[in-house]
Every structure is written in C-alpha cells, then in structure tokens.
Image (tube, helix red, strand yellow):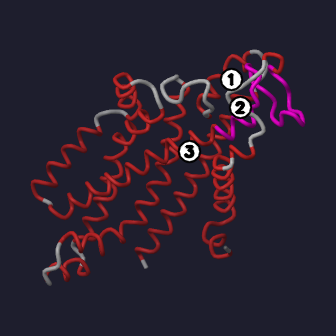
C-alpha cells in the first residue's frame, strides 16, 4: 500500500480512493440504497436534504441519493463494455497487423482509416437509429468507434518490439508466431493496453452520459447519471439544482480521477520501458 501511494502521489491516491468509492457504491447499491430509485411520491417532490432523504428528492419525489447509487451502475457498466470490447479487438487487430505485415497490414490499416472517418457519437446515433435506444446498443457502437484508436497506439509499440532481438531470436528457432506473440509481444504491450483502457473508460463515460442526456442511452425511469442531468434540467430552472448538479459532479470527478490515474500509469509504463 505504501509503495502504491508513493508511486501514485497524493493526488493519484485520492483519485484511486474516489474511484474505489464509486465502484463500491455501485456494487452495494441494492444493500445501501434506502429507497427504490424508480419509485417516487407526488407528496415528496423537491424535498431538501434530511435524515429521511440525505440529498433530497427530485421532481417525481424519488430519493436522489438512491438514484446516484443505482445510476453509478449503468454509468460504469457502459464504459466497461466499451473498454473491454475495444481492448480485445483493438489489441488483436494490432498484433495481427504487426506480425503478418504486408497485405494484411495494409488491409487492416485501410479498415481502421475508414472507422476513423466516423465521429464516435455519430456512429452511436446511427446504431441507435437502427436498433433502438439502449445502453447496450450505445456501448457496442462506441466500442466500434474506439477500436481504431486503441489499435493504432498498440500497433506502433508492437511494431517497434517486433524487430527487437527477444522476438527475432525465437522466430529463428522456428517457434510459431502465435506463441511468440502470446509470450513476448502481448506482455510487453499490456501496460499500454491498461493505460489506454483507463483513459478510454473516462471518455466513454462522458459520451454515454451525453447519449443518455439526449434520451438515446439509458431510458427512464432507470437511474443513470447522464439521464439524471437531463431530468434535472426543468428542476434547475425552478430553483432545485440538486439532481443535475450532483449527477454532473459525479461524472466530472470520476472522469477526472480516471484520467489522472491513466496518466500516472502511462508515465510508469514509459519509465519501465526506458529502464
């Protein structure tokens, strides 16, 4: 633990603690949330903070604290789908491109260039228009949009590693390319994959929240941070900013924390390669 704190620094440690709190809140939401996040009461609308409602209630009389806890679930699950799919397919494309080279590399590069032409949110909106609005549709569409970024970064590093002696030597010994890739190339690009996933998680959270804000992601009455910001707009104009501001603050702090952690991990990975 002391070593982790020394490496991450005080800000990095605080960011890691905040992310841990968010994850624990999401996991334990069914246990610690005092109310059903989708059920409200007309008589409880716009209640201020109190022992009964720690953060007050929204325009439908639903407990804001409970909705933040349950909203953390969808706000984390969506980006998790994005980074998982992106890491698997982006890494596979990069390593296949590097190892086979030639026509395979050229073909895959052209496919990635084609995907680069589509803005992330536009691709997600096109998918939602075809398959209907849902968190899964939005997350998978964003995954496709994120793959070329991940593949390009990993390819550039793997291409450099491909020509080093520790890869060339087993190749001359007749060891198969699949074995060399799994035993040597993949472990050496793994820190880059983790760093990229951490940073992409934050970007995906923002874009999925934007889609939910527009009504294209998580659908009411489910709890989601982006949806809460959208639902709280009218309340904000009426002088009840709690729902929008608290949900927005959760998004900003989580994304900022993940970004800082990603930068620290990237710095450590670079230092390790130089050593």
How far apart marks 3 and 2 lie (CA) works out to: 19 Å
Mark 1 or mark 2: which is in front? 1
Q: Residues within 10 Å of mark 2 (few under 14, many from 20)?
A: some
Q: Which comes sooner in the sequence, label 1 or label 2?
A: 1
Residue 181 within the magenta-colored segment of the rendering: no
Q: Report the residue marked by disc 1.
A: 232
**Number of marks in the rendered image:** 3
Quarter the C terminus occupies: bottom left
Residue 245 has which mark?
2
Q: Secondary structure at mark 1?
A: loop
- Above or below for 146 versus 95: above
- Above or below for 177 versus 127: below
> Which secondary structure type mostly characterizes the magenta part of the structure?
loop
Q: Position of residue 154 (x, y in %)?
A: 33, 59
Q: Which residue is farthest right?
A: 51
How far apart marks 1 and 2 lie (CA) works out to: 8 Å
Q: Position of residue 122 (x, y in %)?
A: 37, 28
- Residue for point 35% across, 52% down: 150
| Span colored in magenta | 45-70
- Residue for point 26% across, 81% down: 166
Q: Residues within 10 Å of mark 1 (few under 14, many from 20)?
A: many
Q: Report the residue marked by disc 3.
A: 76
Between 114 and 176, which is closer to the camera in this rendering?
Answer: 176
Taking the image as shown, residue 49 lies to the left or right of residue 120, namely right
């Amino acid at each position: 633990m002391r070593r982790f704190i020394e490496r991450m620094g005080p800000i990095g440690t605080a960011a890691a603690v905040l992310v841990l709190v968010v994850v624990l809140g999401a996991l334990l939401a069914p246990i610690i949330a005092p109310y059903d996040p989708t059920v409200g009461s007309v008589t409880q609308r716009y209640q201020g903070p109190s022992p009964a409602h720690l953060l007050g209630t929204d325009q439908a009389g639903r407990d804001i604290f409970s909705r933040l806890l349950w909203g953390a679930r969808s706000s984390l699950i969506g980006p998790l789908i994005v980074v998982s799919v992106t890491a698997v397919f982006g890494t596979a494309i990069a390593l296949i491109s590097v190892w086979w080279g030639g026509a395979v590399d050229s073909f895959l590069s052209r496919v990635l260039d084609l995907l680069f032409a589509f803005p992330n949110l536009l691709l997600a909106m096109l998918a939602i228009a075809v398959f209907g609005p849902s968190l899964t549709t939005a997350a998978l569409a964003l995954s496709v949009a994120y793959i070329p970024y991940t593949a390009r970064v990993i390819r550039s590093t793997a291409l450099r590693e491909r020509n080093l002696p520790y890869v060339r030597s087993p190749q001359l010994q007749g060891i198969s390319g699949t074995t060399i890739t799994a035993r040597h190339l993949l472990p050496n690009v793994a820190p880059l994959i983790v760093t990229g996933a951490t940073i992409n998680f934050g970007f995906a959270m923002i874009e999925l929240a934007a889609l939910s804000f527009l009504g294209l992601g998580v659908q009411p009455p489910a709890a989601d941070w982006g949806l809460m910001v959208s639902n709280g707009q009218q309340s904000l104009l009426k002088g009840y900013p709690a729902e929008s501001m608290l949900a927005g603050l959760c998004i900003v702090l989580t994304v900022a924390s993940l970004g800082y952690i990603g930068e620290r991990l990237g710095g450590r990975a670079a230092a390790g390669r130089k050593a």
